[in-house]
Amino acid sequence: MNASVARTPEVRTKLPSVGTTIFTVMSALAVEKNAVNLGQGFPDFDCDPKLLQAVTAAMAAGHNQYPPMPGILPLREAIAAKIEALYGHRYDAGSEITITAGATQAIITAILAVVRAGDEVIVLEPCYDSYTPNIELAGGTVVRVPLTPGTFRPDFDKIAQAITPRTRAIIINTPHNPSATVWTESEMRRLEQLLAPTDVLVISDEVYEHMVYDGAAHQSAARFPGLAARSFIVSSFGKTYHVTGWKVGYVAAPAPLSAEFRKVHQFNVFTVNTPMQHALASYMVDPAPYLELPAFYQRKRDLFAEGLAKTRLKLLPSTGTYFQCVDIREVSDLGEAEFSQWLTRELGVAAIPLSAFYADGFDQRVVRFCFAKKDETLRSALDRLARL
């Protein structure tokens, strides 16, 4: 063999169906066309300066080395106090709360901790794009159950039919990305009753917990004893405090589940950014920023919806998250993906097709906008969308 010939060995992919995400594609197109990017879900405004000052203070105080593996205790204590105050369930800060490198890492860690080869995991489509690759990496089998088309409400008859002796877990997401729907108390109780005779675990993605509108309350799995006892509850400081690039989140789970979670956590990230943890712990002393968040985003939702109402786009209800979905049927004969690209190229506004959140590309002629933007950004987008 000629040793001078370099060769990269072939690797059989573990994720053959995964390519470039729609978010990357649409964001790149938005940059190319100088479009207003209402596609990818992150704010274009900064966080509270007090939070930045708290990070600087933490670094100056010497908090720059490894923190404890599950996260610094003051932050875990602040999270436990918040959950108890809002949802009435007390988690032990020492054994039941773990700080993670964002919600995405939290979700894959929970899945890797409990899902073995051949286990089934139910996902409710449309769903966030990390869920199914995470299950596949764990050797599990994805079982897809559609949310009701049009309303995106859970269909408990279909969920019940999907549960088998091999079902290890179900992933739920409320407030829901991408549809902006929020599960009701009765729906959470229905899930609690459905799972009661089973050993099915719940991974409850609650990253938009503080973005619920019109006076409604977020129905965390922590509120319901039968769910709290079997749930990994995932949330995100990035979404709550407008710092998505910090990638800091947390998981709350009963001690036996947390113990298994931490076994995986310590070997895939081990620990999470130290000064950010100290800053967040001090910032959480004041609950106002997350208690006032619904009103902050509801005003943006209403501003955006008022402008969209002047177009031929049909608004779907946006009861949570910072997304607004619209039906495009009166505007275009194009499918969702084609329409999203046309909108970006021709009108200069980027959106995300809901079909990207379905494994089979199910097209309901609905696209998603993100309204977590400055008012001037939203008005600029609305000026362009007024041509529809």
Image (cartoon, grey):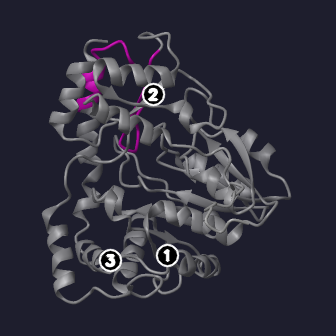
Label 3: how many Cα within 10 Å (few below 14, some 14–19, many 20+): many
> Distance between the Cα atoms at labels 1 and 3?
15 Å
Element type at marker 1? loop
Q: Residue at x 47, y 61 (%)?
A: 103
Query: How far from the left and from the top, in percent, is residue 168?
Result: 75, 61
Can you say whether 70 is above or below 7 in the image?
A: below
Indicate which disc, 2 or 1, sits on the residue closer to the N terminus.
1
Q: For numbered disc 3, what is the local secondary structure?
A: helix
Of marks 2 and 3, which one's residue comes earlier in the chain?
A: 3
Q: Residue at x 64, y 64 (%)?
A: 111
Residue 73, by quadrant, is bottom left
Residue 359 percent location from the top left of the image = 65, 38
Dot 2 corresponds to which residue?
367
Q: Quadrant of residue 378?
A: top left
Q: Which mark is residue 277?
A: 3
Residue at 35%, 63% (x, y): give it.
Answer: 237
Which residue carries the number 1 mark? 269
Disc nearest the viewer among 1 and 3: 1
